[in-house]
Image (cartoon, coloured by chain):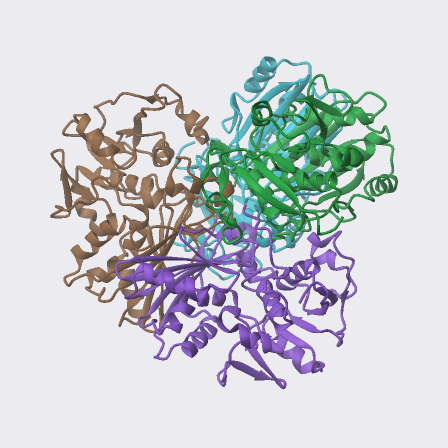
Chain colours: A purple, B green, C cyan, D brown
Amino acid sequence: MGNEVSIKAGIVGGAGYTGGELLRLLLNHPNVDVAFVLSNSQGGKPVHEVHKDLLGDTNLMFTAEFQAEADVVFLCGGHGAAMDFMAAQTLLPSTKVIDLSQDFRWNESTEDSAVKGFDRAFIYGLPELQREKIEQAKSIANPGCFATAIQLALLPLAEQNLIQEEVHVSGITGSTGAGQSLSSTSHYSWRDGNISNYKVLQHQHLNEIRRTLAGMQKQELPAINFVPYRGPFTRGILCTSYLESELSLEEAEQLYKSFYRSHPFVTVTDTIPDLKQVTNTNKCLLYLEKQDGKLIITSLIDNLLKGASGQAVQNMNLMFGLEETAGLKLKASAF
Amino acid sequence: MGNEVSIKAGIVGGAGYTGGELLRLLLNHPNVDVAFVLSNSQGGKPVHEVHKDLLGDTNLMFTAEFQAEADVVFLCGGHGAAMDFMAAQTLLPSTKVIDLSQDFRWNESTEDSAVKGFDRAFIYGLPELQREKIEQAKSIANPGCFATAIQLALLPLAEQNLIQEEVHVSGITGSTGAGQSLSSTSHYSWRDGNISNYKVLQHQHLNEIRRTLAGMQKQELPAINFVPYRGPFTRGILCTSYLESELSLEEAEQLYKSFYRSHPFVTVTDTIPDLKQVTNTNKCLLYLEKQDGKLIITSLIDNLLKGASGQAVQNMNLMFGLEETAGLKLKASAF
Amino acid sequence: MGNEVSIKAGIVGGAGYTGGELLRLLLNHPNVDVAFVLSNSQGGKPVHEVHKDLLGDTNLMFTAEFQAEADVVFLCGGHGAAMDFMAAQTLLPSTKVIDLSQDFRWNESTEDSAVKGFDRAFIYGLPELQREKIEQAKSIANPGCFATAIQLALLPLAEQNLIQEEVHVSGITGSTGAGQSLSSTSHYSWRDGNISNYKVLQHQHLNEIRRTLAGMQKQELPAINFVPYRGPFTRGILCTSYLESELSLEEAEQLYKSFYRSHPFVTVTDTIPDLKQVTNTNKCLLYLEKQDGKLIITSLIDNLLKGASGQAVQNMNLMFGLEETAGLKLKASAF
Amino acid sequence: MGNEVSIKAGIVGGAGYTGGELLRLLLNHPNVDVAFVLSNSQGGKPVHEVHKDLLGDTNLMFTAEFQAEADVVFLCGGHGAAMDFMAAQTLLPSTKVIDLSQDFRWNESTEDSAVKGFDRAFIYGLPELQREKIEQAKSIANPGCFATAIQLALLPLAEQNLIQEEVHVSGITGSTGAGQSLSSTSHYSWRDGNISNYKVLQHQHLNEIRRTLAGMQKQELPAINFVPYRGPFTRGILCTSYLESELSLEEAEQLYKSFYRSHPFVTVTDTIPDLKQVTNTNKCLLYLEKQDGKLIITSLIDNLLKGASGQAVQNMNLMFGLEETAGLKLKASAF
């Protein structure tokens, strides 16, 4: 399809970080008209009073009332808010839904790769896992940020049944992952120059990671051990994963490059990467090493883009038959 | 003109920060083909080995040889390199030149708003000052970063002959203003958490600022006092200027809004701004206050964009009759 | 006096940033026993649960009840809290008070260099201004952080009646100046990489600055213009002040070095300074330049030390006849 | 011993980061006179021209010539420089040596816990491992920074023969670990907001870690896997180590608290720690968790202090019979 397509998009919970980032993308997207931005707390205010970088770009106002006639609705509230919204509103059957929270990513009774709820089947929206299902989907559960970085590091192995030993992952996230709520660990005087870990070996994203990988692998999935860190920066996630592997480095590189060949946002790099290569883009970089019998995979994304709002737009593009990269060719900040 | 225009652009000195930022813009620009990226030091290497965020976006290689058939050549070398390049190369008369260094911004014998050199008249490329001259120009001297922020703060006053008392300016710049050369003041362990001033009351950009303002004002221009600071961040410039003024706040706001009405990248804001509203965009924000008889103007830009490569593209757009904003609707990084 | 002196010190409002910094100093001070740390909000908790770096250093508990038998009480609550405390408590006449808030720094009816209140005369505690008065004082109003940096830059001029033209000051402060209250301008995702100005030409510290300087100068004091900035770092203040002056650079250096000769925490440096030379110390550095008839003074302090708790301890040392530097020879963090 | 002891200390390679940090400590140390600071590059300059925070604290000059009459010599040159120095100079037999480089930490022929060279036996200077040997030593190989953090996390287990399965460690270091040499990964514009890993599973400190642990454990030591990260901050190291363990959390806490009971700089904390609790101190914090059969140990130090110069002073204190904490009760920067 071309430039003639125009999608009426609504954003629910538009005053938060993922809502703002989505707005930044959709306002520049060639095929989207932002129909409304709903915010319970900011209704009636100009959007640029909250997302101040949008001053001069838009005169949109936050609304406090849902408008049903959208082609697609993005749910950007906190965890739990999507369930509440779906329970309170009656959506048109034709309206597509993309939920950025964890509400529909996973549950105990998950079957057939979708979470059921409110007469809808929420497809897990990781395009590099199941692009075809996403293209046909009416409802999407957009993956978590760490979950995206870790799954992209491990998908090619799981598909080949090659996760046969425990996986060890460490990863560092910037402060925007914690959103705009003020808290002691997001207080500047605390976080600047500081490092801490949290939820060691028990991060909530392990659920969706395990579900994906277990669904791909024929044999039982070993433990995935994950040590998450908070770092003194705002955007981005870098993860290092390793596991015993009989693949040579060349075989691994061939496997990964082949797996991601048709996926425009994932690049396997031959040189050691750093986070700012992906900051402010929708890209994922992967880097492979082999050491002492262990395969090491470094994966990097921008948590607000490929880890949230960018991936949501990528899913929208697929659901509406647009070019997968439409509106997502972003200038890296680089510095 | 529309999407059908295709400009063959060459970049000279493409391995530095402004060259890289220009590449990031031109690769996504709808009307530009990058014909070559010249670098004496990196000739023969893929561009993405130096500008690593471009991995996956381009297979361009640096060349060490100039290619004359470009429609426009951007000179991104250090100060002095543009003079050297112009002396060494014979450009086609039809080739337009945009120099990002200070070599052609100002000299003692400047007359008629242009610096003469090498059979060319270099027009000072501040679109908000002289858009029409830029549209007709064949050669542009792109303004300095601090010079852009300070001039945009003062142009409306100078045009009305209202700079009648000394102006006091302080401004803070990020580290990218110093480029990619390693130095003690760009060493991370030194600069993180650090502040310093430099060239107090003697910054080299005062020359081009004074030339512009003196050229606009009918009466003699008083002193412009400027205190520049280095700050612990990478992108952006924020300046605060003040002077005695008989304008009321309302009159000043009206003057500024009227002056910049037709200029798409300058916005006069009604609420106190912060730097990240403009980071990673080509925007300039202006904010006015009145206190104790003094008019206070806060101005903010991204030093690599509106202060360098973004403004260079804006000038190119004007010189080729494109939409002024073509290729410059950038997603703010915001965080 | 020597090591045998032991002062019983109490801290009121000990859970905030200045209270914590004071504790860090007093616990290592050779002549002090911390008698109690009062906090309305944290009473009953170990001190190291709030000031976590003190874990392993002390088993002190916060108390919610004032204990009257202290030799000196430091008031570290927010502005207004000191007034409230003095109204609510009856102090022993022998107990000395050092208030770190602005409550007793200045008022309209100030006379004879002290603010009267609650049967006490609060001496303004800037040792480089009036060490002898401080040595005799029973009650001290500890100066503000910006006020300290700016006054130390201007005292030698005021004493010689040399502030004859308007003074122009810009200064940048780290985030700890805003304390530990969570706010939008102290949210990490906002403040990192960001710069903003605030209260331009109307900062509240101008009151105490003007009072001091006007008290020293025989002739009327011209305007002091002050542009304060928030910067992306935690500790420290750097100010640049300039004014028309007939002093040569050599005369100015001689004046300043002579003025501060006997003051152990102030050094006039011959090379351009940077903030981290004073970070985590009680020092003030001064640097002089002369440009175009203007004398430029750069002054640097750590806002939590020379700008708050360190100066409070310096005042305590003077009040109790100790070495002025006792407990204040701190290792700079340097990085 | 008391204040009467006075040790004449010399620093070789005093212009670098560890040399500067050592000077900051020794100048305030109650029992030390700094006899000389040798620097090949800076000989003849005042020390405060290089270590600018020392301005006002000392008039020491760098010397280019070694002075043999010192009681202790600290070797602070880069790796290789200590070997060169020992080969070139003839030390008095009575002069003690503390080498901060890796030159004498480990070699293939190591036996009996010391590295032999130049008629000396270099004892590995980790006080929590072998305080008694250090007290008797004439020559010390001061441990590496990551090596210190990781060993302190694992010593109590190794002593009890409890490292029976592979250990997985990730750790993040600040920029001062890379010293003052300018490099692309220490360029501010690159490192700010950036994260990268390096030497994954092959960091050079693994040698000394394995030597220590293998020397303590009776049974063979399994693999120690280590993923090091560079972070955007200046000071400090935080490591997370985990391994399969049959210890309950309570047993582990008892083991660790018992092991470190007599060691003044190591504290086992009951609440999740963050790096700034130890920044600018000589402390090490340890925190234990148990999850899914795995024991998790978080360890934190300041890389320049407990990870380098602070530990060197701690070793000196032990070698000269001083209080172990002499000169090392440092005010945390905390922010």
A54 lies above or below B233: below
Q: Nearer the viewer, residue B306 or C335?
A: B306
Q: Position of residue D66 (x, y in %)?
A: 25, 23
Could you say which quadrant of the image residue D299 lies in? bottom left
> Number of numbered discs present?
0
Would you place residue B199 above or below residue C6 in this image?
above
The reply, left or right, for residue B88 in relation to residue D328 is: right
Task: Judge whether residue C9 can be spotted in this image.
Answer: no
Q: Horizontal and vertical percent for residue D4?
A: 27, 31
- Along the horizontal axis of the image, is A256 left or right of B86? left
Visible residue check, residue D304: yes
Q: Is residue A143 above or below residue C225?
A: below
Query: Which one is nearer the viewer's eye here, C296 or C305?
Result: C296
Q: Is residue D88 left or right of residue C6?
A: left
Determine which quarter of the picture holds residue B321: top right
Relative to B47, say whether B204 is above or below: above
Q: Residue B254's image quarter?
A: top right
- Name the one closer to the observer, B163 or B36: B36
Q: How far across and down, in percent of the image, does residue B72 sit?
A: 65, 37
The x and y percentages for residue A27 are 70, 59
